[in-house]
């Protein structure tokens, strides 16, 4: 049997999902499950729930050390993820994933309250990811057709760092991957 996209994703989470999510107190898998849970709780479309689950899959695709940001390295995980997902999922999944870092930069620029509530690791990565936006970047992002879905995903992403939050298992979210995957 061919290794399908969904099987590949499940395998990645099984093999590498227990690694720590940046400097946070959750694993990569816990973070992904929490973001997907928040998306599901808001009755998001299946593609956006899949995007929430997959938004940081780029961290599972590279071999950089967990402390790469401490050495001034931005892993560009959003671009790595989008490149890997592009042939496997529609734009409704891929683009919010690709833009979730841009959404962070936007929210930090336009919402001082959002910036104040970032965790220290998220502040560190913000600087590596380009920092605050200028007005040209803001306008370009606001005009992107995936602006709203990227903002929603970013808010779920930032909230998905609770080591005590109970979520459904990965198997629960496979349905959203199967609904949206191209193969």
Image: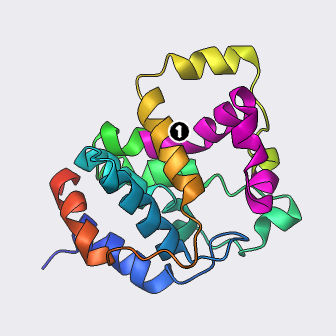
Nearer to the camera, 143 or 148: 148
Q: Secondary structure at mark 1?
A: helix
Answer above or below: position of 48 versus 2. above
Nearer to the camera, 62 or 127: 127
Q: In the image, what residue occupies the spot 54% across and 73% down?
A: 28
**Is 163 included in the stretch rendered in magenta?**
no
**Is 103 included in the stretch rendered in magenta?**
yes
Q: In the image, what residue occupies the spot 78% across and 73% down?
A: 67
Q: Is residue 1 left or right of residue 147?
A: left
Q: Which residues are magenta?
A: 96-125
Answer above or below: position of 65 versus 176. below
Residue 108 position in % (x across, y down): 72, 36
Q: In the image, what residue occupies the spot 34% across and 70% down?
A: 9
Residue 102 position in % (x across, y down): 61, 36
Q: Quadrant of the C terminus?
A: bottom left
Q: Residue furthest right?
A: 71
Tell me the residue that label 1 is attached to: 99
Q: Residues within 10 Å of mark 1 (few under 14, many from 20)?
A: many
Answer above or below: position of 15 versus 144. below
């Amino acid at each position: 049997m061919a290794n399908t996209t969904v099987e590949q994703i499940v395998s990645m989470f099984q093999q590498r999902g227990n690694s720590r999510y940046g400097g946070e107190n959750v694993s990569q898998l816990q973070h992904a499950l929490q973001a997907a849970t928040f998306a599901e709780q808001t009755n998001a479309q299946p593609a956006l729930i899949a995007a929430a689950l997959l938004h940081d899959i780029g961290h599972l695709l590279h071999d950089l050390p967990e402390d790469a940001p401490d050495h001034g390295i931005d892993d560009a995980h959003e671009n790595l993820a989008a490149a890997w997902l592009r042939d496997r999922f529609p734009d409704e999944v891929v683009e919010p994933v690709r833009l979730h870092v841009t959404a962070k930069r936007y929210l930090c620029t336009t919402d001082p309250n959002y910036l104040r509530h970032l965790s220290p690791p998220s502040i560190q990565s913000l600087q590596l990811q380009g920092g605050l936006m200028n007005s040209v970047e803001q306008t370009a992002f606001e005009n992107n057709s995936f602006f709203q879905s990227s903002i929603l995903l970013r808010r779920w992403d930032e909230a998905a760092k609770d080591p005590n939050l109970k979520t459904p298992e990965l198997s629960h979210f496979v349905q959203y991957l199967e609904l949206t995957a191209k193969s």
